[in-house]
């Protein structure tokens, strides 16, 4: 189902800088609920991933390192898993352990709300919850672009 949603959304509809995603929540691996709105006041990178996505595997440790580096300044990562089976996400996380929050979205609610154009995709939200940077796909050479966007948002004053 989630894959069908990903393939059905034209890129022109995807959230762009200046857009704000709707109020969303999803269960974490431990079953507790994470609401995107609870991250207001922080700079948030929303990373969409799936167990079958090789570039997702590459991106996750790099994003985890960014959260380690900038977490004290108010940066956090939310990994949104779109696998239809929880077991697939758990198995991948046994191979690629990360410290950032992982939420499970087998129905594809978050990808639909973001109008996800491809996998992986990442959206950097400012402290007010507005999209400021979008990265579709992932290659190692993309990390400096993501890090620069994180640094820029951490320096930006709210409302600025």
Image: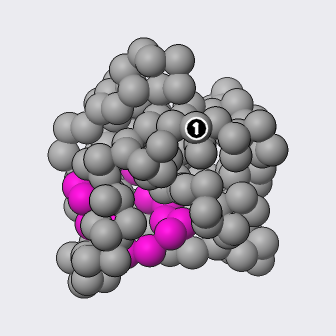
Vertical order, 15 against 150 (above or below): below
Image location (x, y in percent) of residue 76: 57, 37
Of the pair 124 and 151, the residue shown nearer to us: 124
Q: Is residue 154 left or right of residue 111?
A: right
Of the pair 49 and 61, the residue shown nearer to us: 49
Residue at position x 46%, y 35% in the image: 103
Q: Is residue 20 left or right of residue 122?
A: left
Image location (x, y in percent) of residue 48: 49, 55
- Residue occupied by mark 1: 87
Vertical order, 71 against 111 (above or below): above
Which colour style is shown? one colour
Of the pair 10 and 84, the residue shown nearer to us: 84
Residue at position x 54%, y 66% in the image: 120
Vertical order, 106 against 4 (above or below): above
Image location (x, y in percent) of residue 24: 25, 38
The quadrant in which residue 25 appears is top left
Image location (x, y in percent) of residue 117: 37, 75
Q: Is residue 99 visible?
A: yes
Q: Is residue 121 left or right of residue 67?
A: left
Quadrant in the picture for the N terminus:
bottom left
Residue at position x 34%, y 32% in the image: 26
- Check if residue 120 falls in the magenta segment: yes
Magenta residues, start to end:
112-125
Vertical order, 128 against 19 (above or below): above
């Amino acid at each position: 189902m989630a894959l069908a949603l990903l393939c059905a959304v034209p890129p022109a509809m995807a959230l762009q800088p200046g857009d704000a995603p709707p109020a969303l929540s999803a269960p974490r691996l431990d079953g507790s609920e994470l609401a995107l709105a609870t991250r207001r006041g922080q700079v948030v990178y929303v990373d969409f991933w799936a167990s079958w996505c090789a570039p997702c595997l590459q991106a996750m440790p790099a994003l985890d390192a960014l959260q380690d580096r900038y977490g004290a300044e108010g940066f956090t990562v939310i990994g949104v898993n779109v696998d239809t089976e929880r077991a697939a996400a758990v198995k991948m996380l046994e191979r690629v352990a990360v410290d950032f929050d992982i939420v499970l979205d087998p129905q594809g609610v978050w990808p639909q709300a973001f109008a996800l154009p491809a996998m992986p995709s990442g959206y950097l939200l400012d402290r007010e919850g507005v999209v400021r940077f979008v990265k579709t796909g992932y290659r190692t050479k993309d990390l400096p672009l993501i890090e620069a966007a994180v640094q820029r948002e951490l320096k930006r004053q709210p409302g600025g």
